[in-house]
Amino acid sequence: MEKPFAFTTKEFNAVRQKIRSLTGINLADSKDNMVYSRLSRRLRALNLTTFQAYLNYLDNHQDETEHFINSLTTNLTSFFREAHHFEQLAEYLHSHPGPLRIWCTASSSGEEPYSIAMTCAEARGSLATNVKIYASDIDSRMLERAKAGIYPIDQVEKLSLARRKRFFHRGTGSNAGKARVVAELRNSIHFFQQNLLAPQYSVDPGLDIVFCRNVMIYFDKPTQEIIVNRIVKLLKPNGWYVAGHSENFNHLTAIMRARGKTIYQVNEKPI
Ligand SMILES: C[S@@+](CC[C@H](N)C(=O)[O-])C[C@H]1O[C@@H](n2cnc3c(N)ncnc32)[C@H](O)[C@@H]1O
């Protein structure tokens, strides 16, 4: 099919360089069609006719940066994705009955932090728990969705009946076909925007657990190590760093050690 806009290798490389410097995301050579289709929408929205005009616009309009980043992030997620992490979290909660702080660093549309919050509520036997949950993402559109906590019913129907009843309201009228996370659970999470590439994170140290899953795969190795080191500084000794299924930090033995499938425990005295 003929593409309405020309998209040269030079323009693709300029996009790659820009997104990498803004977010750390490394786009492979094979992502040219993905970039074309996602950014074409921005060209149309702005009535621009060439990618070069879009790149110039991006350089001269600060507020386009957010649209550019939001267009190029990949936000795939689901409730209780990689279920074994939530089983381990439940065990941690039972063996640590005191107050805890957990940060979900790339929370996308919210399914992951809500899965953490549901696990906490189940373990503590109440929607009001002594666990403080923080959830962040770089993508402002995803953060808005996460805060709203409204999901298509077919996504929620994959959860057990007990979880659906306890943690969701079924939409009616114009909200038919959707379900919303109950207010107590929504309010138990502090959502904020955070670029993991930033030199400082807006979370105080002393965290017990950090979920940083399925985002490091988009960064190169040196960037991953910088970010892991920053996160580890925010974790308590013996705190947990929870990684995604294809993210491996077994080599970072100076700061943390593996303690199960893609969970790492921070060393007592990081060297
Ligand atoms: C594939 S999703 C993973 C979502 C969730 N953690 C999970 O495992 O289901 C990757 C998320 O990382 C976010 N992301 C990408 N680059 C980021 C960055 N530099 N800082 C923070 N979040 C980023 C994206 O916006 C996206 O929501």
Image (spheres, rainbow, N blue to C red):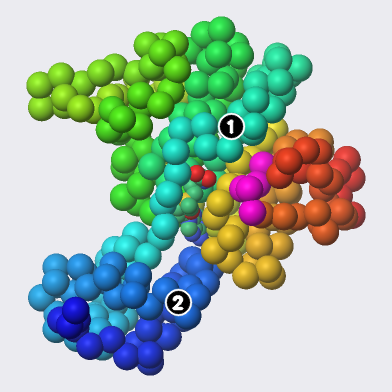
Is residue 209 in the magenta section? no
Residue 93 horizontal side relative to residue 110, left or right: right
Determine which quarter of the picture holds residue 41: bottom left
User: Residue 232: image x %, image y %?
Assistant: 73, 48
The residue located at (31%, 40%) in the rendering is 145
Separation of disc 1 and disc 2 at Cα? 31 Å
The answer to whether 107 is drawn above or below residue 127 in the figure is: below
The residue located at (50%, 75%) in the rendering is 28
Q: Amino acid at mark 1?
A: Ala
Residue tagged 2: 30
Q: Which residues are magenta?
A: 241-246
The residue located at (35%, 32%) in the rendering is 155
User: Residue 137: image x %, image y %?
Assistant: 45, 49
Residue tagged 1: 83
- Is residue 150 visible in the rendered image? The answer is no
The secondary structure type at the circle numbered 2 is helix
The secondary structure type at the circle numbered 1 is helix
For ligand 1, tell me if the residue under mark 1 lies within 8 Å: no
Badge 1 density bin: few <14, some 14–19, many ≥20, Cα 10 Å = few
Q: Amino acid at mark 2?
A: Ser
User: Residue 221: image x %, image y %?
Assistant: 68, 68
The answer to whether 165 is drawn above or below residue 114 in the figure is: above
- Which label number is shown at residue 107? none
For ligand 1, tell me if the residue under mark 2 lies within 8 Å: no
Find out whether the residues at labels 1 and 2 contact each other: C-beta distance under 8 Å.
no
